[in-house]
Amino acid sequence: MFKFTHYNFNVLDLDRSIAFYKEALGLEPARTKEGPNGSFKLVYLHDKDTDFELELTWLADRTEPYNLGECEFHLAMATRDMDAAHKKHEEMGCICFENPAMGIYFITDPDGYWIEIVPWR
């Protein structure tokens, strides 16, 4: 009866976040929405292979970093080439945790959100 459509991350610097997700994961803006008087902006990123989107929310009056707790929640993305992805993320300096035994690793975005990188299945 239901399907996933999107997941939200609140960000402080929208342009920096869009650039990160484009470089690190190949995500592109699909659509945007602006609030009255520029009070907020939503940018939905997509991967071109699925209907799922990552919604980035920027709030005009927000100046302090978001409290992400203990980073126990995360978004996961699959890749067909773990070696190439790992090399790219290593060069970007965004790998924050690796678990070679499970064959996965995590990267962190500019606001500290964790993204798990897993093999394509």
Image (cartoon, rainbow, N blue to C red):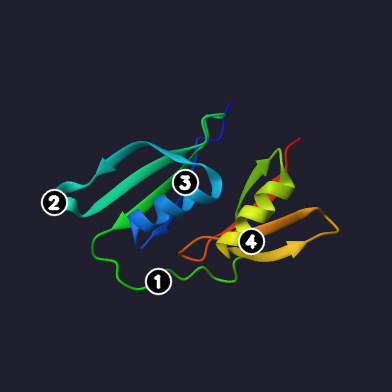
Which mark is nearer the camera, 3 or 1?
3
Q: Secondary structure at mark 1?
A: loop
Which mark is nearer the camera, 2 or 3?
3
Gap between marks 4 and 2 measured at Cα: 40 Å
- Residue designated by label 1: 65
The reply to whether the C-beta atoms of the residues labelled 3 and 1 are less than 8 Å apart is no
Q: Nearer the viewer, residue 46 or 91?
A: 91
Find residue 39 and report its horizontal and vertical position in percent.
20, 55
Of pointers 1 and 4, the one earlier in the residue sequence:
1
| Residue 22: mark | 3
- Residue designated by label 2: 37
Gap between marks 2 and 1 measured at Cα: 23 Å
How many marks on residues? 4
Residue at the spot 56% in from the left edge and 61% down from the top edge: 92
The reply to whether the C-beta atoms of the residues labelled 3 and 4 are less than 8 Å apart is no
Q: Secondary structure at mark 2?
A: helix
Q: Amino acid at mark 1?
A: Pro
Vertical placement of residue 29 versus 84, above or below: above
Residue at the spot 46% in from the left edge and 65% down from the top edge: 111
Q: Nearer the viewer, residue 75 or 91?
A: 91
Of pointers 2 and 3, the one earlier in the residue sequence:
3
The reply to whether the C-beta atoms of the residues labelled 1 and 4 are less than 8 Å apart is no
Q: Amino acid at mark 2?
A: Asn
| Residue 90: mark | 4
Residue at the spot 71% in from the left edge and 58% down from the top edge: 105
Residue at the spot 46% in from the left edge and 63% down from the top edge: 110
Q: Residue furthest right?
A: 101
Label 1 environment density (alpha carbons within 10 Å; few <14, some 14–19, many ≥20): few
Of pointers 4 and 2, the one earlier in the residue sequence:
2
